[in-house]
Image (cartoon, helix red, strand yellow):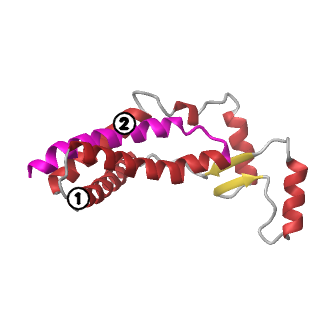
Amino acid sequence: MLIGALVGSLVLFFWQFLSFSLLGIHNSGMSYTPNQDAILEVLDANLEEGTFFIPRAPMDASMEKQEALMEERVGKPWAIVSYHKTLSNNMGMNLLRGWAIDFAAAFLLVWLLLKMADLDMKTALMASLSVGLIGYFTITYLDSVWFETNSIPYLIDTIVQWGIVGAWLGWWLPRN
């Protein structure tokens, strides 16, 4: 169980590294603007740290005021802004946290697969892809519907990384 989860977590971790760095699959979600310095100055002067949907009515606004604001803004610009006052480059801790989550996910998948009678390659592969796609559909894709973002890079990640993990576990687990 531990070896299956460890190797599975390393597959997830290294695919994520490749996907976000060398392969550039997620570049569309992190575009450059030559106006970044001016934008950051305006944000720094006008926002506290947090994530904002703009425009949005105040939390205590009546339903009528919220609906009126949305009707008034249809066809006009909108944004989602995640603003931080300081950039921290804590790569070591971020990598450790990323791998720990990958290990937990792989461990849960191994546990689930070991509960299946007559586990074979096909079952492990399909179960692994199913777990990945459930997460993609209910979180990433649903967010992309509401916030009009591109979720295709995450779909690629889901299929590749959970497919490889499923193939690994389909080979490894029935042998042990």
The image quadrant that residue 60 belongs to is bottom right
* Amino acid residing under circle 1: Met
Disc 1 packing (10 Å; few <14; some 14–19; many ≥20):
few
Gap in angstroms between the C-alphas marked 2 and 1 = 23 Å
Nearer to us of marks 2 and 1 is 1
Establish if 148 lies above or below 112.
above
In the rendered view, does 3 fall on the left or right side of 59?
A: left
Helix or strand or loop: what does disc 1 sit on? loop
Q: Is residue 70 left or right of residue 117?
A: right
**Does the magenta portion include 152?**
yes
Q: Which residue is at 80% across, 65% downward?
A: 58
Q: Which mark is residue 116?
A: 1
The vertical placement of 162 against 18, above or below, is below
In-image side of 2 versus 101 (left or right): left
Question: Measuring 68% from the left and 36% from the top, which residue is drawn there?
Answer: 37
Of residues 86 and 16, which is closer to you in this image? 16
Task: Give the mark, 2 or 1, whose residue is nearer the N terminus.
Answer: 1
Q: Amino acid at mark 2?
A: Val
Q: Nearer the viewer, residue 158 or 46?
A: 158
Residue to which mark 2 is pinned: 160
Q: Which residues are magenta?
A: 147-176
Residue 4 forms part of the magenta stretch:
no
